C-alpha cells in the first residue's frame, strides 16, 4: 500500500509540472463496467488526463485514475491505472485516442498488475466540460492465477 501512495504522490507532482508546460488537463469522475474473467461488476472512479497538441495536430498525453468496485459480496477491488494516449481530433470537438495502459489492482487481499491497450472517444460539450467513453483490455498477473480485466467507461471531464 505504501508503494501505491508513493506512486500516486509522484503522479500528482508530475501533473503539476505538466500543467505549467501548456498541457490541457482535465479531472474526470465516472462509472465503469468492469469484467474480471467472467464476473462483471460496476466500479466508480476519479482520474485526470493531460494532453498536448503537436504542430501536426496529433495529441500526446497521459491519464490515470483510481477506482473502487465490488466483484462479489466479500471481494472488493481497488484499481490504479496509468494510460499513455495518442489522439487526433476527427471532427470539431470529437477526438479519438489510442491507449496503452498499465494497471495495478488490490484484489482479495493480494496484488495484481498488468499491461493492456484500448481506445476512447472524447466529445467537448463546452470549453470546460467533456464526455469520454473508453474501452480497455488488460492481461493481469495475480498471485494464484492470471486473469483478463476488461473495462468500458463513461466519464464526465472538467477542464481546469
Image: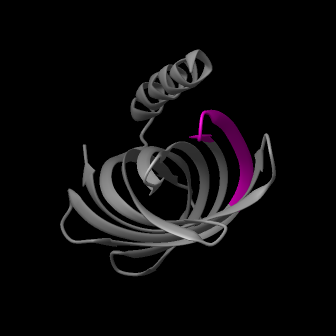
Residue 111 falls in image quadrant: top right
Residue 77 at x, y = what percent?
51, 46
Whole-percent x, y for residue 128 in the image: 20, 56
- Count numbered badges in the picture: 0
Is 115 a magenta residue?
Answer: yes
Can residue 97 be seen at all in this image of the molecule? no
Near-viewer residue (97 or 9): 9
Q: Is residue 140 left or right of residue 5?
A: right
Farthest-out residue, bottom:
91
Q: What secondary structure characterizes most of the magenta part?
A: strand
Residue 145: percent from left, percent from top: 81, 51
Stretch in magenta: 105-116
Q: Tell me what residue is drawn at x 41 percent, y 63 percent.
A: 32
Q: Is residue 27 visible?
A: yes
The quadrant of the picture occupied by the C terminus is top left
100 in the magenta segment: no
Please state which of residues 62 and 110 is positioned toward the viewer in this rendering.
Answer: 110
Screen quadrant of the N terminus: top right
Residue 96 higher or lower than 50, as above or below: below
Amino acid at each position: 500500500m505504501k508503494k501505491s501512495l508513493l506512486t500516486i504522490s509522484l503522479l500528482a507532482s508530475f501533473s503539476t509540472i505538466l500543467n505549467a508546460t501548456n498541457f490541457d488537463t482535465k479531472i474526470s469522475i465516472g462509472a465503469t463496467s468492469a469484467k474480471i474473467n467472467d464476473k462483471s461488476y460496476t466500479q466508480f472512479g476519479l482520474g485526470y488526463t493531460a494532453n498536448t497538441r503537436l504542430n501536426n495536430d496529433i495529441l500526446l498525453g497521459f491519464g490515470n485514475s483510481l477506482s473502487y468496485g465490488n466483484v462479489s459480496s466479500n471481494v472488493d477491488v481497488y484499481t490504479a491505472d496509468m494510460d499513455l494516449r495518442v489522439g487526433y481530433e476527427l471532427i470539431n470537438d470529437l477526438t479519438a485516442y489510442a491507449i496503452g495502459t498499465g494497471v495495478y489492482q488490490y484484489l482479495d487481499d493480494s496484488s495484481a498488475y498488468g499491461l493492456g491497450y484500448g481506445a476512447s472517444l472524447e466529445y467537448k460539450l463546452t470549453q470546460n466540460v467533456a464526455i469520454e467513453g473508453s474501452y480497455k483490455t488488460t492481461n493481469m498477473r495475480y498471485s494464484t492465477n492470471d486473469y483478463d480485466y476488461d473495462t468500458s467507461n463513461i466519464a464526465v471531464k472538467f477542464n481546469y
